[in-house]
Amino acid sequence: ELQLVESGGGLVQPGGSLRLSCAASGMLTGHMNWVRQAPGKGLEWVSTHTGVTQYYADSVRGRFTTSRDNAKNTLYLQMNSLKTEDTAVYYCSQGAWTQPSARGQGTQVTVSS
């Protein structure tokens, strides 16, 4: 099973930016996802990188960008124009986001003034 480790979370003011990284223990293959879970809420899909195409939830499209560096076995999530409602634990996962074959431990993102 692929091991995934997220990093890059933290506290940022509204309108700020963060870049999350997801380092994999092996090759990035297939669909790689970012999902998040806000306090008291369920898991929410954020983005999927198929290796060719990127897909985004309506709530983040135009503000977030997913990329992958296959040479470094790393997935990224560039988050700009952050809003308070983006506050959540962010996870990367592999496969179908509803039933992933691997998922990291998450990194906390807090957007607050």
Image: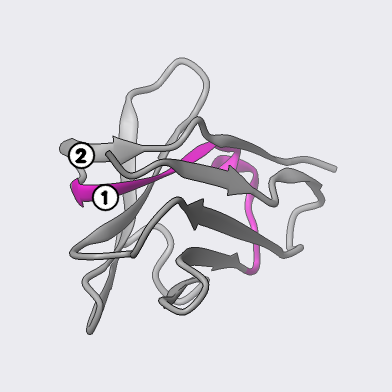
The vertical placement of 102 against 24, above or below, is above
The vertical placement of 105 against 48, above or below, is above
Amino acid under label 2?
Pro
The tag on residue 100 is 2
The vertical placement of 109 against 94, above or below, is above
Amino acid under label 1?
Gln
Q: Is residue 20 left or right of residue 98?
A: right
Q: For this rendering, which residue is in front, 2 or 52?
A: 2
The verdict on residue 85 being magenta is yes
Q: Position of residue 34 (x, y in %)?
A: 38, 52
As helix, strand or loop, the secondary structure at mark 2 comes to strand
What residue would you read off at disc 1?
94
- The residue lying at 63 percent from left, 52 percent from top is 83
Q: Position of residue 78 (x, y in %)?
A: 58, 69
The tag on residue 102 is none
**Does label 2 or label 1 sit earlier along the sequence?**
1
Q: Magenta segment range?
A: 80-95
Res. 36 image quadrant? top left
Asked whether the beta carbons under mark 2 and mark 1 sit within 8 Å of each other, the answer is: yes
